[in-house]
Amino acid sequence: MKAARLVAGLSLVTGAGILLQWILVWTGTFPVVESTPGFRHYFLSFAVADMWLVISAFMTAFLVRRGDRRAVLAAVALGSAMLFFGLYALLYDLNTGLLFKTSAEELFGKGVTLYNIAVGAVLMWLGWTSVARADAA
């Protein structure tokens, strides 16, 4: 049961964090800097995909809190999307040299990448093991 609460909590934090980031980008509070040629277009291309993550995150939390057995699929799907995004961003940073830059913006980006990899893996694991067991109980 604690694991199910953790999955719901991580899902809510993830969805709210991504939504907040895009609100800040769209209002100009969080400027997207052209740190490498084409980066601004690359970053802004993720708006729709990130909205899918937001919807998935909120739906996962909702299903977990309701005790709906579809929460297993939702948690694994959300975790998988996060892991995909994190690994993609990691390789992009490696290929462009951004991985070795330590500006505040780049450190924030590295934190987001690590969060996606770590939390995505945790959500998949807990969704598959603990949420499924909580559903069977």
Image (cartoon, rainbow, N blue to C red):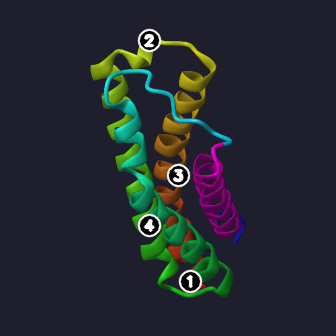
**Where's residue 109, x and y in %?**
53, 31
Q: Which tag, 3 or 1, sits closer to the chain's start?
A: 3
Q: Would you say residue 10 sits in the magenta stretch?
A: yes
Q: Residue at x 50, y 66 (%)?
A: 127
User: Label 4 sits on what residue type?
Assistant: Trp
Direction from residue 92 to residue 13 in the image, left or right:
right
Write down the residue under mark 4: 52
> What secondary structure predominates along the stretch shown in magenta?
helix
Vertical placement of residue 136 versus 20, above or below = below
Q: Which residue is more in the foreground, 39 or 79?
A: 39
Q: Which tag, 4 or 3, sits closer to the chain's start?
A: 4
User: Label 3 sits on what residue type?
Assistant: Val
Q: Which mark is residue 135?
A: 1
Write down the residue under mark 2: 100
Whole-number angstrom distance, CA of label 4 to CA of label 3: 19 Å
Q: Mark 4 or 3, which is nearer the eye?
A: 4
Q: Are marks 3 and 1 in contact (CB under 8 Å)?
A: no
Q: Secondary structure at mark 4?
A: helix
User: Label 2 sits on what residue type?
Assistant: Phe
Write down the residue under mark 3: 122
Direction from residue 37 to residue 18 in the image, left or right:
right
Q: Which tag, 4 or 2, sits closer to the chain's start?
A: 4
Residue occupying the far front of the picture? 28
Magenta span: 4-28
User: Label 1 sits on what residue type?
Assistant: Asp
Disc 4: CA contacts within 10 A as few (<14), some (14-19) or many (>=20) = some
**Where's residue 24, x and y in %?**
65, 48
